Image (cartoon, rainbow, N blue to C red):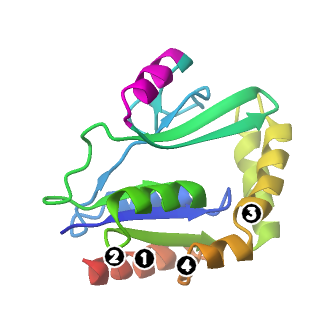
Amino acid sequence: MKKIYCMMGKSSTGKDTLFKMLMEDQELSVKTLVPYTTRPMREGERDGVEYHFCDETRLKALEESGRIIELRTYDTVHGLWKYFTVDDDQVDLEKYSYLLIGTLEAYLKIRDYYGKDRVIPIYIEVEDGLRLQRAVERERKESMPRYEELCRRFLADAVDFSEEKLTDAGIEKRFINENLSETEHIIRQYMLESE
């Protein structure tokens, strides 16, 4: 049986970059489970790649059909944004392993849905000062920077990924991302050993 690797961590820890590096690794040969969101698409994002971007009507139809595995709603300065995982026939654990990026809450619900032995957490950490610096640098590149939302997310992460919640979720192994290539190598070895 193959695995679902759920990469998570606070914002600006390098999850997206590490994800892309691991997805390109031919030996790992993982697929991705593309999540869904109602938030607006950011510059450089593509529908069906980073997320399936949809509206409330499509979300409601998926809920009514019983296909939502997990759903989170965030009250942002730009309105309610929803992120969710759908049982949409993307997953075949008989043939493939998967890598996805999610929150702690998403990890728990996906783990409960597919089973603890099949869903493996990969928790990424970066010192808070460096994280904040990275977040500001990334947001500055946007045509319309959303600094208020950046601050909201930074503060919310302290609650969402508190030590108590990490302990309750059974997250023991952590990957400190001080150097992308080293962190990618360590995660890669961990995934290979978990298969």
Residue at mark 1: 187
Do tag 1 and tag 2 residues touch (Cβ < 8 Å)? Answer: yes
Q: Answer yes or no: do the residues labelled 3 and 2 have beta carbons within 8 Å?
A: no
**Is 61 left or right of 26, judged from the image as shown?**
right
Category of crowding for the residue at label 4, using alpha-carbon neighbours closer than 10 angstroms: few (below 14), some (14–19), many (at least 20): few
Determine the residue positioned at 42% across, 62% down: 111
Q: Amino acid at mark 1?
A: Ile
- Residue drawn at 60 percent across, 34 percent down: 82
Q: Per the image, is 65 magenta? A: yes
| Of callouts 1 and 3, the N-terminal one | 3
Distance between the alpha carbons at the discs numbered 3 and 4:
24 Å
Mark 2 to mark 4: distance in Å? 18 Å
Secondary element at image label 3? helix
Quarter of the image with the C terminus is bottom left
Q: Which residues are magenta?
A: 57-67
Q: Nearer the viewer, residue 131 or 40?
A: 40
Mark toward the start of the polypeptide (3 vs 4): 3
Q: Mark 2 packing: few (<14 Cα in 10 Å), some, or many (20+)?
A: some
**Quarter of the image holding residue 95?**
bottom left
Looking at the image, residue 23 sits to the left or right of residue 153; the answer is: left
Label 3 or label 2, whichever comes before in sequence order: 3
Task: Please state which amino acid type lies under the numbered disc 2.
Answer: Met
- Residues under labels 1 and 2: Cα distance? 6 Å
Question: Pointer 4: what residue?
Answer: 170
Of badges 2 and 4, nearer the viewer stands 4
Disc 1 and disc 4: Cα gap in Å? 18 Å
Give the prevailing secondary structure in the magenta stretch.
Answer: helix
Identify the mark nearer the N-term, 2 or 4: 4
Q: Alpha carbon of mark 1 to alpha carbon of mark 3: how far?
A: 20 Å
Residue at mark 3 to residue at mark 2: CA–CA distance = 25 Å
